[in-house]
Image: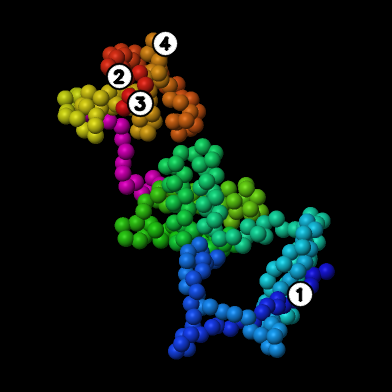
Amino acid sequence: MARIFKLTYAKMRTLKGPGGKPLKVEKIASRGPNKGKRIMVAKREPVTRNGKLVLAESRKWYIEYVNADGITRRVPGYTDKRATEQRAAELERIAAYKDVGLIDQHAEHRKRPLTEHLDEWHAALIAKGTTDKQAREVHTRACRVIAGCRFTRWTDLSASKVQAFVADLRKAGKGISIKTGNDHLAAVKQFAKWVVQDGRAPHSPLTHLKGGNAKQDRRYERRPLTTDELGWLIDTTEHAPACRRMTGSDRAMLYRLATGTGFRATEMRSLTPVGFQLDVDPPAVLLRAADSKHRRDDLQPIRPDLAELLRGWLADKPTDGPVF
């Protein structure tokens, strides 16, 4: 059975020097913001009466109980004895429930700040192979929504507040586009889904949220280059001066390869000479799984005329290291 008690300790008094000023002594702080640093504190000594220590009791009550694992624990209670007795009974009840498998496994996670869950989610994204850039983007968007809605604990999450916050982002100032708002919704929903999958909550309150129709709010109309535009770009670049530590010829080949494979900029930077399989039919370029957004090997076929241009261009390149 749990017992409650008050701690007893020797009563202390501050020593004073000439002029009634407290005497100071140097010590290393064991807690607080100055932990581990040398600080000056008032010199104290135990109070005695008739040669015996004068004892005092703590203002707060303490609880000693045995948890479900059979380990004796001591935790602080309250200054009110009645409230401490109720807390002791609750701890005993929790221990009993846990012993028979009835404990709420999500209780501790509900008490933790959402910032801790967010940081652990970001680490989990990296651990499963998500690129640093992608993990950072979704983490930043989810943090923006949660901070904007002033959510601090999991129980604070509200679908209506999230939807209202994202709607306000679209109205404020120039406002974000519907697509960007959808990206914020997707990020915070992804976080909530991970919390549930990781066994930290029974369900997500954001599951039913849906984004808007991005076609209604196009900020940038993207289109492919025409054949004439692409030809002009490559021809102009071919004879252009060096830029960003790349010659005009290298940049022109970069544009040819990008349009011939569809690889992203970061994927192009990872290509090495061994990835160019130009003597097979059809010729192809290999993108390793570690460098691909999809995290799988991508063997992209290319046109024979592009392969012929690459063969001559690669002849002057080092055999190790990226080609761009």
Q: Disc 4 marks which amino acid?
A: Val
- Which badge, 2 or 4, is on the more N-terminal residue? 4
Amino acid under label 3? Pro
**Crowd class of label 1 (few under 14; some 14 to 19; many from 20; radius 10 Å):** some
The residue positioned 44% from the left and 51% from the top of the image is 140
Mark 1: amino acid: Ile
Upstream in sequence: badge 4 or badge 1: 1
Task: Determine whether, in the image, residue 217 is placed left or right of residue 245.
Answer: right
Expressed as whole percent of the image width and height from the top left, the position of residue 266 reads 37, 33
Mark 3 = which residue?
A: 322
Q: Residue at x 70, y 89 (%)?
A: 50
Q: Earlier in the sequence, mark 4 or mark 3?
A: 4
- Report, in whole angstroms, how far the alpha carbon at label 4 lies from the one at label 3: 21 Å
Q: CA separation, marks 2 and 4?
A: 20 Å
Question: Does residue 166 belong to the magenta stretch?
Answer: no
Q: Is residue 258 left or right of residue 299?
A: left
Q: Which residue is mark 1?
A: 4
Identify residue for label 2.
Answer: 317
